[in-house]
């Protein structure tokens, strides 16, 4: 309402965020939170298994260093930038929600930032001083200690961000308690952390497993040892990850659980929900199989055998994040702001006067007979475009064609009637916020989209048109009126006093 | 005061939630954290430019080739700190100026998102240059091509940020801007950019003076001909030249800035900052023209004086922004208050929803039921075929003799079919509505 509507009409705005966020979570969990302790443990093993008079086993240490180099390069480039990228993309797609969350969670994010700075400094120290630390045993032991510090700080950054995520998903408490502590004490917090911690360890382990195959020679003693170490690591964490997944799923509030069957796609693809279950079971069991195989016949393991479970494990995490993101719906901030970025409490006003009147940017402040389709486009941009495109991913035309049949031309009246009541049947949809005229205009626009294949360019390309009701001119008049009203009431009081 | 804002200027409403901290504290955090961030960005960009330059000279001079390698090694650390230190100012500006900042980024959204791949690629290229240094010893043009691409990216990316921090200051332009490139052409973007790049070179000069001049730095391991004094003198000269240039570019920035943010306080802050740089320039001049053993004499004072200059300039930047946006923010506050009042009023007297049921008189007694169905059920149920749930014909068959069962199901559905999603409850319908609905459903014939 108050921001220009950035819009990607083919890719879908949410998909942009999802792409960046999923990539980031995979790197954060798989290459930082779970990977660093895995690497530090391997580094420690090198010292423990070295011959007398050696600081560490040089061949082993150089393998672990190379693995860490991969982690270092990816986390400090793609990992760091996708982390910032979540923010950049959310701030253009969903500015009202992120700006509201920042006002409430400023301290959480500020503390997160301090921990994050520490984490970056530690990873720079840990990786860049690796080779120098091999000069004395004391330096090496101190270096390993830095590895453990880094592991702890990586975990703390995750623990804080999970609080914010948990808060957004738990409906209701936004209104009553605007505090950080509430994020930690909400019922989804601990289950999420219990799920994410071992899962990160598991994914870090399987990724390390894959790297160790890349950096060692076939049939070498060192590869067999690395495979065994990775296998033990995975066997420790896999059951905990599974238990965490079950715990988390059970702790989900009922309302969100109801949405879960539609999470992975649309209602029509409810069977995808089953797929999620199979992916979880599939991912954890293939990882387990390769771990057991690694313990049993470490010399038989080769690259391709590990690649598949590794992809499965990252895929599992990706799908999990997709589901987590979806079950918030119809809200973007539980009980406060819908996913169309409109506050629940403003709905009565929008229903009474229409949303166009209050939109900062619209070429049609009011629906008339002559501007119906254009007004419908503005309504669409304001109320639907955060999740729907015209002809791209999650296209509004396709959604209705699935209902009414692909070859049939849309009937405006039935689209309007459906849209009015859709939040009752499809609980993940927010209620339509506008008035009757806007609803009809929207229906006319959707029919127009089907007939013409029209698309929307988004404010980032075509700019915005300022609503005269929300311009400096209008607000100056409002101020004048307020001054006059104040003066009038003063006069009234004065007259009353004089009597 | 309001005359400076044109009629076509939008007045969005502000985020209707309190600021998390007192405003002055947020402003302090914003200014301080921004300066910390920008210094490391300066070092990252200056370092990359110098690496490229030294690598090109290094084609013929081995010492410069090694110097390029030494400088390129610092980029890894500086760029990581630049990114992570950027989070705090981003957080603070999103709190203080959410509406202005996010409006600017939305209006240039495509390029704003492009920051992520562009910076990622630039970072990867600097790593590639660093970690293939010895591998590419025999293929130097390729090595130069890699660092040149990274430099080009690093020189372009600041423009994206500048366009946004500039556009956010001018709500009167929001209605006219069409995408990144049109916002790039606003008058003072390029002078500010030049100001920034020149500052990067000045800061990097000081950094190299310190970094390669440290006693613990094994200088003699890397260089045959160049001495510590040579490097220090060159680094200092770079800082001096860049600082002198700022005395031309700075006034240019002031001239191209729209008048609306100016006041005496701003002029005072900027002039104070500039005047503190003058003794620093004098000390540097003495150092590079004096005896080699005295080159370190005033280094501490130079760093302190120039740091104070930077703090003044950073504060001046904020004073301009605060001045420029104050009238607009006042209007926004008025609009926000008015909207909150209207919203409260509407909430307390909710509009009476007229029945939107469109009755089709041809349907006779089940017309109302059909309309209720259309509004509440048609998204999932069709007459003859499965949509999300089963078709109406199936319902009519199952409940042919059990109307109450059908009504009960609508009120509180269970889950019967494993291959269908569960139906939500329709508790909001009245008993009468459910009666009409059931009558209509049961009237459907195969």
Image (spheres, coloured by chain):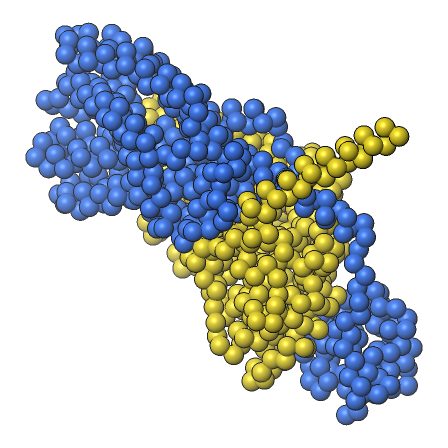
Residue B205 coordinates in the image, percent (x, y): 25, 24
- The reply, left or right, for residue B356 in relation to residue B297 is right
Residue B192 coordinates in the image, percent (x, y): 33, 34
Reply above or below: A403 against A105.
Answer: below
Quadrant in the rendering for residue A73: top left
- The reply, left or right, for residue A163 in relation to residue B314 is right
Reply above or below: B358 against A1.
Answer: below
Reply above or below: A137 against A434.
Answer: above
Return the residue found at the far bottom.
B446
- Name the residue at 45% across, 62% down: A457
Quadrant in the rendering for residue B426: bottom right
Quadrant in the rendering for residue B35: top left
Reply above or below: B332 against A330.
Answer: above
- The reply, left or right, for residue A48 in relation to residue B39 is right
Taking the image as drawn, is residue B94 in sight? no
Which chain is assigned blue?
B
- Name the residue at 10% across, 22% down: B225
- Name the residue at 32% across, 19% down: B274
């Amino acid at each position: 309402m108050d921001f220009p509507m950035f819009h990607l009409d083919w890719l879908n705005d949410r998909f942009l965020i999802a792409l960046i966020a999923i990539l980031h979570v995979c790197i954060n969990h798989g290459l930082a939170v779970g990977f660093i302790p895995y690497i530090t443990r391997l580094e420690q093993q090198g010292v423990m298994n070295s011959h007398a008079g050696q600081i560490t086993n040089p061949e082993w240490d150089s393998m672990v260093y190379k693995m860490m180099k991969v982690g270092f390069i990816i986390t400090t480039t793609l990992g760091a930038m996708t982390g910032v990228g979540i923010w950049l993309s959310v701030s253009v797609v969903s500015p009202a929600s992120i700006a509201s969350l920042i006002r409430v969670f400023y301290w959480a994010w500020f503390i997160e930032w301090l921990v994050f700075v520490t984490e970056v400094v530690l990873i720079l120290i840990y990786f860049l001083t690796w080779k120098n630390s091999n000069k004395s045993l004391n330096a090496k032991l101190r270096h390993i200690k830095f590895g453990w510090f880094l592991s702890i700080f990586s975990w703390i950054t995750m623990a804080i961000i999970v609080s914010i995520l948990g808060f957004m998903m738990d409906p209701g408490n936004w209104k009553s308690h605007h505090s950080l502590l509430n994020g930690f004490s909400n019922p989804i917090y601990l289950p999420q952390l219990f799920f994410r911690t071992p899962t990160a360890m598991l994914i870090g382990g399987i990724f390390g497993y894959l790297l160790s195959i890349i950096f060692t020679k076939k049939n070498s003693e060192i590869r067999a040892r690395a495979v065994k170490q990775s296998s033990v690591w995975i066997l420790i964490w896999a059951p905990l990850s599974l238990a965490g997944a079950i715990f988390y799923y059970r702790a989900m509030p009922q309302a969100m659980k109801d949405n879960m069957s539609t999470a992975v796609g649309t209602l029509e693809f409810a069977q995808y929900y089953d797929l999620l279950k199979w992916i979880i079971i599939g991912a954890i069991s293939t990882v387990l199989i390769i771990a057991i195989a690694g313990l049993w016949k470490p010399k038989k393991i080769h690259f391709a055998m590990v690649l598949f479970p590794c992809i499965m494990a990252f895929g599992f995490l990706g799908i999990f994040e997709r589901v987590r993101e979806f079950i918030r719906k119809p809200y973007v901030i539980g009980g406060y702001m819908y996913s169309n970025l409109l506050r629940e409490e403003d709905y009565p006003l929008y229903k009474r006067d229409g949303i166009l009147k209050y939109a900062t940017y619209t070429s049609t402040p009011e629906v008339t007979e002559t501007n119906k389709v254009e007004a419908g486009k503005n309504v669409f941009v304001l109320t639907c475009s955060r999740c729907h495109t015209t002809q791209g991913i999650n296209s509004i035309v396709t959604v209705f064609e699935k209902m009414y049949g692909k070859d049939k031309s849309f009937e405006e009246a039935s689209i309007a009637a459906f849209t009015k009541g859709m939040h009752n049947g499809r609980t993940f949809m927010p209620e339509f916020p506008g008035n009757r005229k806007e609803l009809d205009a929207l229906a006319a626009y959707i029919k127009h989209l089907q007939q013409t294949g029209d698309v929307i360019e988004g404010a980032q390309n075509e700019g915005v048109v300022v609503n005269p009701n929300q311009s400096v001119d209008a607000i100056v008049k409002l101020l004048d009126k307020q001054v006059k009203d104040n003066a009038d009431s003063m006069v009234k009081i004065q007259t009353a006093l004089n009597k | 005061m309001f005359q400076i804002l044109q009629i076509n200027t939008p007045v969005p409403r502000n985020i209707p939630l309190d600021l998390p901290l007192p405003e002055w504290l947020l402003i302090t955090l914003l200014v301080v954290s921004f300066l910390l961030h920008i210094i490391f960005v300066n070092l990252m960009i200056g370092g990359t430019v110098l690496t490229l330059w030294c690598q090109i000279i290094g084609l013929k001079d081995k010492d410069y080739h090694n110097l390029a390698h030494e400088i390129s090694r610092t980029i890894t650390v500086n760029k990581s700190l630049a990114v992570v230190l950027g989070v705090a100012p981003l957080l603070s500006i999103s709190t203080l100026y959410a509406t202005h900042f996010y409006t600017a980024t939305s209006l240039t959204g495509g390029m704003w998102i492009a920051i992520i791949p562009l910076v990622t690629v630039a970072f990867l290229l600097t790593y590639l240059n660093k970690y293939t240094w010895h591998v590419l010893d025999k293929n130097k043009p390729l090595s130069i091509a890699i660092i040149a691409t990274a430099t080009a990216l690093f020189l372009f990316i600041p423009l994206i940020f500048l366009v946004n921090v500039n556009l956010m200051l001018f709500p009167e332009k929001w209605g006219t801007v069409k995408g990144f490139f049109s916002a790039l052409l606003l008058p003072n973007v390029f002078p500010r950019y030049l100001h920034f790049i020149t500052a990067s070179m000045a800061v990097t000069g000081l950094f190299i003076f310190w970094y390669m001049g440290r006693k613990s730095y094994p200088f003699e391991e890397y260089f045959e001909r160049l001495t510590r004094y040579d490097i220090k003198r060159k680094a200092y000269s770079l800082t001096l030249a860049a600082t002198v240039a700022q005395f031309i570019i700075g006034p240019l920035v002031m001239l191209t800035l729209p008048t609306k943010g100016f006041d005496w306080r701003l002029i005072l802050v900027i002039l104070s900052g500039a005047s503190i740089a003058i003794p620093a320039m004098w000390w540097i001049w003495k150092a590079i023209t004096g005896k080699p053993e005295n080159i370190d004499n005033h280094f501490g004072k130079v760093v302190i004086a120039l740091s104070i200059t930077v703090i003044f300039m950073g504060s001046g930047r904020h004073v301009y922004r605060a001045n420029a946006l104050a009238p607009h923010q006042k209007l926004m506050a008025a609009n926000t208050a008015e909207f909150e009042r209207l919203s409260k009023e509407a909430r307390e007297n909710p509009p009476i929803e007229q029945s939107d049921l469109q009755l089709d008189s041809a349907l006779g007694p089940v017309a109302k039921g059909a309309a209720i169905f259309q509004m509440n059920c048609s998204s999932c149920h069709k007459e003859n075929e499965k949509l999300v749930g089963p078709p109406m014909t199936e319902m009519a068959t199952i409940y042919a003799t059990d109307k109450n069962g059908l009504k009960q199901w609508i009120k509180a559905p269970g889950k019967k079919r494993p291959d269908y999603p569960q139906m939500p409850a329709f508790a909001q319908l009245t008993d009468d509505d459910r009666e009409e609905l059931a009558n209509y459903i049961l009237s459907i014939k195969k």
